[in-house]
Amino acid sequence: MFRNNNPEVKFRSTCGALVFGAAAALMIGSPGLALSAPSTGSGSSAAEVPVTMSDYKGAESTLPKTYAAPKAGALKSFTIGFMNPVGGNQNLQAVQDGAKVETERLGGKFIVKNDNGDVNQQLRNFNQMLVQGVNAILLYPLDPKSLGPVIAQAKKKGVVVIGYDVTNTANDPLPDGYVSQVMQGRDWQAWAMSKAMAAAKPGGQIALIGFAVPVPGIEYLMQRVKYWSEKMGLKVVGRQDNQEDAAAGGKTAATALLGAHPKLDGIIAYNDPSAAGAAAAARTSGRTIAIVGMNGDNYGIHGVEQGTITATFQNDAVGQGVQGVVGAYDALSGLQIPKTIVRPPLSAMTKSNVKTVTTWDQQLSALNAK
C-alpha cells in the first residue's frame, strides 16, 4: 500500500510541519550546486550533478515573486498583527522576525500572537487582534472554513488580511476576505527535491515520508514529489507518515520503509527533522541511501554537514515575513496588489556549499542594518 496514515495524531502538531519559505530582497537564480557524497559511514549518498533552482519551468515559475516596493512614509501610522501558528518553530520564528523587522523599518507597530497549532486558539487570537485595532493581519489559516466568519468581520472593518499558503495553487480562488496570499511554492519545492534525488540515484527506487495529519499543503507537496520523481525516472515504491512531526517520528517511518523495501535507494522527506530521522534509521540498519529534506533549518544543516543528509533546500523564511508586511503596507496605502505571489526555496544546501549559504540569522542582521 502506497500510504500509511494515522488520523489519530493531534492537530496541535500541524503547523510545526508547515515550513514557511519565501524570498524578499534575495532573488531567484542560485548557481548550480553539486550534490556531493559523504566520505564515510552508512546513511546518505549522492552523486555530482547540479541542481539549479531557476531551471524550474512549472506553473509557479510565472507567478509574481514580490509586491511593489513600499513607499516609506505613505502611512503615518499602522499596526501589523502577526499570528504565528506554532511559536518556537525555527522556520516560523524566522518568518515572524522578518515581518517584525520590516514593520518597524516602515514605521509601524508589530503585535504577535501564538496560535499553538490550535484552531480555537487561532480564532481567539484573530478576534483579539481585531479588538486591539490592528490594520492588517498576517496568518497561516489552520482551518479556512472555521476562520470564515472572523475573516468576514475583518473585511467589514477594513482590516487587510494576508494569508500564507491559503490555497495549493494560484488557480484556486482565494476565500472571501483575503486580500492576497504568499505561497512558498510547493510545486517548486517538489521539483527541486525530486531533481536532487534523481541526481543522487538515477532511476532508483525511492520512498516518501509525509505527515500523518492531512494538512492540505503538505499533501499537495507529497503529490507533486511523486509526480516529479516519476517524471524524472525514479520509482516511488512506498510512503510512510511521520506521526509526531519530529525526528523520532521520521526515524520510525523510515525504519518501516527500509524494512519493507530491501532495495530502496532513497527517501524524500517533507521536512528536515523527518530527513534527520531517516538518516538515523539508515545508520541503525547499516544501509546507505540518499536522503533529501526541505527547510534549511538546523536539522538539515547539521545533517548535510555530517554527510547523513544528501541535500536540503533553504526556504527564505525571513523574506516571506518581509513580503507579507510589504503586501499589507501596499494594500493599506491604496495600491492594487496581486492576489498571489510565490517565494520558492532560495537554493540547494549540499555538503559542498552548506557552510557558505547565508543563514536566516545573517539575513535578519542584514535587514536590521538597512
Image: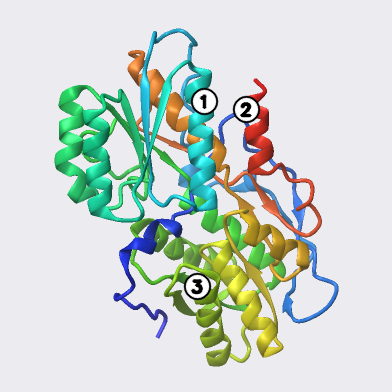
Q: Which residue is mark 2?
A: 367
Q: Mark yes or no: residue 247 visible.
A: yes
Q: Secondary structure at mark 3?
A: strand
In the foreground, 22 or 368: 368
Going from N to C along the chain, the mark reached first, 2 or 3, is 3
Going from N to C along the chain, the mark reached first, 2 or 1, is 1
> What residue sits 40% from the left and 86% below the top?
1
Going from N to C along the chain, the mark reached first, 1 or 3, is 1
Position above or below: 100 against 201: above
Contact (CB < 8 A) between labels 2 and 1?
Answer: yes
Position above or below: 265 against 19: below
Q: Which residue is mark 3?
A: 209
Q: What kind of residue is marked 1?
A: Glu
Quadrant of the snapshot with the C terminus: top right
Q: State which quadrant residue 164 falls in.
A: top left
Q: Position of residue 287 (x, y in %)?
A: 70, 86
Q: What kind of residue is marked 2?
A: Leu
The mark closer to the camera, 2 or 3, is 2
Q: Which residue is mark 1?
A: 102
Q: CA distance from mark 2 to mark 3?
A: 35 Å
